[in-house]
Image (spheres, rainbow, N blue to C red):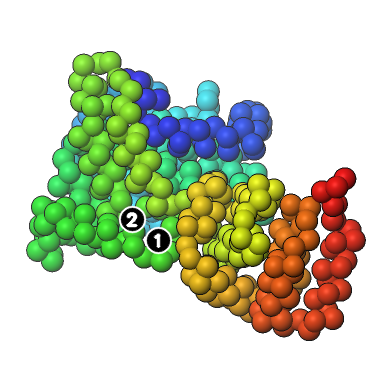
Amino acid sequence: MNYEKIRINLEQQLGNEIFQAVQGGIILEILKVAKFEDMELDYQKIIDGKHSRVTASVSPRLNEICQEVTNSLEYKGEIDFYIVKQSEKAINTIPGITGERAPIIAMNSDLIEHLDGSELRFVIGYELGKLITRYADIKRVLKFVFPVYDAIPLLLRNKINFWEKLSELSSDRFAWIASPNINKIASCLYKLSSRLDDDKFDVIAEDYWETNEKILENYLQEENPDELTYPVNPLRLKAIELFGKSELYKSLANGAVIDDSRLSREMDELVSNFITLFDTELDRQRLIFIASGGALIARADKKIDASEYEKMLKVLSNYTLFPERVLNIALSNENETIREMFEKSAEMIIQQDPQEKIAMYKYLIALALADNEIMMSEMRELFGIGKRIFGYNETEIAQIIAKEIQENFIHKAY
């Protein structure tokens, strides 16, 4: 099975970039030689003999399901399955160490009781997808290199955030191959998110699926859908539906996986709803400030110079993987809408972190000077913003602008 063609292209690209950025290959080799284990709770209990390994003699039915999944995905690597009790996670993949031990998929005993055979195949296929895509290995390296999450550089953190979302959707494709029943998948996701049996609330999987399009539409209309770490169930179901109906999936039966440009376009459109990546509301407001503030200053002289546009893109690239798209969305609005977005974001940022005020104002000045011209229309806008938004008086504004001109301005004549 050609795993690479099954995966989402951008997920593969970002995963490789992240792995290379943190020297993942070298780190994994060092961890192997050092016999380093991060000893997460489930693994510690496994080596202590407190959890049960899934075998044909001890748990024949579950073992049969596990083998059916590995066979359907043509997974040839070593792997151990365990039943765990009182785990914080419903199901957990623990990456293996080459030559030392096999990867482990640890299933919570409560999960096994709540899911039927088709649903179990889905979640096991999903976890196997994490191994196939190397998601588990990359997460292990990141956890080792950055034991404190906040220490991850912002742009890399944003890239990791988006990659995690795409990885979930890629793993869902392998889960579908293992259990191609959309209604069972819908009921499985419902049980996992609610931790309740669907029959207790008389939830019919078909009805849950039929309302998915409306749920997804409402979700995407929310002001801030992408602050979630993982895609919501309606988005996952839509992505699975697209894959299940695709020519790519149909080609698996013939043993020759094809490229599917239509599926790629449909997925690009779907995941484009998560273009602004941020961990906090403050990060989101910074992104809005940069885009809307830049648009206001750049439009003050009735035109947007290429140098101003590039300056905004450069700053936005610290907050999103798609700076051009974010900026174009901002520029597509009327000035009144842009000003409203700008003033709201500036007020919130200054309120939460007053120390950012001078840097924010200098960013706007730098944009005005980016085309190597000093325009009175831009200066009037800067003075107005300085007084109204930042609370400076005219003398303070003039001093800040004068200093920036003296230190950074180069007239176009040169």
Residue 209 visible somewhere in the drawing: yes
Q: In terms of image quadrants, where is residue 123?
A: top left
**Mark number displayed over residue 232:** 2
Kindly identify the residue that appears in the image at 16 percent across and 40 percent down. Answer: 181
Q: Horizontally, is 296 left or right of 216 in the view?
A: right
Count of labels in the image: 2
Q: Is residue 230 above or below residue 248?
A: below
Task: Count residues near mark 2 (Cα–Cα under 10 Å), then give few for <14, some for 14-19, many for 20+.
Answer: some
Residue 63 visible somewhere in the drawing: no
User: Quick one: 201 or 54, which is closer to the camera?
Assistant: 201
Q: In this view, does 396 lie above or below 60?
A: below
**Mark number displayed over residue 401:** none
**Mark number displayed over residue 225:** 1
Q: Position of residue 229 (x, y in %)?
A: 45, 55
Q: In terms of image quadrants, where is residue 217?
A: bottom left
Task: Count residues near mark 1 (Cα–Cα under 10 Å), then give few for <14, some for 14-19, many for 20+.
Answer: some
Q: In terms of image quadrants, where is residue 169?
A: top left
Q: Is residue 237 above or below residue 405?
A: above
The amino acid beneath tag 1 is Pro
Q: Position of residue 327 (x, y in %)?
A: 54, 54
Locate the N terminus by quadrant: top left
Q: Is residue 135 above or below residue 184?
A: above
Answer yes or no: do the residues labelled 2 and 1 have beta carbons within 8 Å? yes
Kindly identify the residue that appears in the image at 47 percent across and 62 percent down. Answer: 333
User: Quick one: 84 or 270, which is closer to the camera?
Assistant: 270
Per the model, the C-alpha gap separating discs 2 and 1 is: 9 Å
User: Quick one: 325 or 375, which is closer to the camera?
Assistant: 375
Which callout, 2 or 1, points to the residue nearer the camera? Answer: 1
